[in-house]
Amino acid sequence: MAYATESFFPTKYWHKLEDGRAQCDLCPRFCRLREGQRGLCFVRMCHNGEIVLTTYGRSSGFCVDPIEKKPLNHFLPGTPVLSFGTAGCNLACKFCQNWDISKSREFDTLADTASPGALADAAVRTACRSVAFTYNDPVIFHEYAIDVAIACHERGIRTVAVTAGYVCEEPRREFYEHMDAANVDLKAFSEDFYWELSKGHLQPVLDTLSYLKHETNVWFELTTLVIPGRNDSDQELEGMSQWVVENLGPDVPMHFTAFHPDWKMLDVAPTPPATLARARDIARRNGVRYAYTGNVHDRAGGSTVCHQCGEVLVGRDWYVLCEWNLTDDGCCANCGTRCAGVFDGPAGTWGARRMPVRIGT
């Protein structure tokens, strides 16, 4: 069924099956669709025998956020980022914290429209250093995200993907050619968790992380939502952080964030702050140089420390930068050791503000 507000934007990552269905080849779900059917993501469908994107140019809203909210602690700290998303998702996480957007099946959710050029112009107008594809996964609005990224780069604006990393090899390569930074949601370190709670698989995510590290110049950080009794055991946290250091290196930041009861996991208690502190300690003990806690007030767990001399490089109180001991090119002001990341001049001063933006076409 077509909706009055939707469009049909052509895509290329699909092929025709012998039985007449069209198979989407964007992500490892490989949805096989008959005419009029939608993939699990909801926004890609079979129309006239081809896979099309139905949400190109439409958004669930635009907002200027602190870059630390993505979370990215080592990418232009303190600067504002223009954030937007669409609707739908290619995973089915029972614990989704943005389920009203990611699981939306209503086009009323997509109340705002913006061409790629208009969105890039809005970033310039609001003095944002970057644009973030967030709230839901940009993998599913691949074509729109890339066109926005191209328009942003033409205006000197950088691009950020907030993603679960669940994407196939060829579209992944094209997508990250246009991204400057990413936060990848490493949901757990077990196949059972991914399948039982997200209806996905772990290996494609690990493949994306390895690709980002070894085949791109994209700055990326990792986030794990720590859920009591599901992915918070010492064994799993040990295995995850060891894999990160061995395969991605010690400089990839890891964020351990607090779960709150939501969507289909209302019966699970919120994550105790002590659990996040334990996860951070395990990661640091295994060689992760930059490990953080999130979604809780923890000034020490949110601050960046020099791995060489122990100096606090960037002190954070929630999203406010309260201490800055980095040189303009990202070195420790005390001992001169380089802090991994993307630093360009002094700290930004955006703070914790959240500013909704209306853009229009």
Image (tube, rainbow, N blue to C red):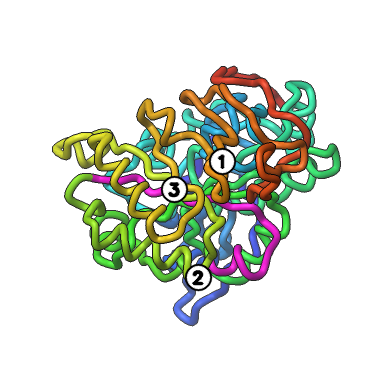
Q: Amino acid at mark 1?
A: Leu
Where's residue 287, x and y in %? 45, 59
Q: Which residue is identified by label 3?
A: 223
Amino acid beneath label 3: Thr
Q: Residue furthest bottom?
A: 18
The residue nearer to you, when weighing 6 against 257, is: 257
* Left or right placement of residue 191 versus residue 53 in this view: left
Q: Residue at x 49, y 64 (%)?
A: 27
Q: Which mark is residue 72?
A: 1
Give the Cα distance between marks 1 and 2.
20 Å
Residue at 66% across / 58% down in the picture?
Answer: 176
- Residue contact at pointers 2 and 3, CB within 8 angstroms: no
Q: CA distance from mark 3 to mark 1?
A: 10 Å
* Element under disc 2: helix
Circle 3 residues within 10 Å: few <14, some 14–19, many ≥20: many
Instruction: Tell me the element at label 3.
Output: strand
Q: Which residues are magenta?
A: 210-227
Residue 247's mark? Answer: 2
Q: Earlier in the sequence, mark 3 or mark 1?
A: 1
* Magenta highlight on residue 212: yes
Could you tell me the amino acid type at mark 2? Answer: Asn
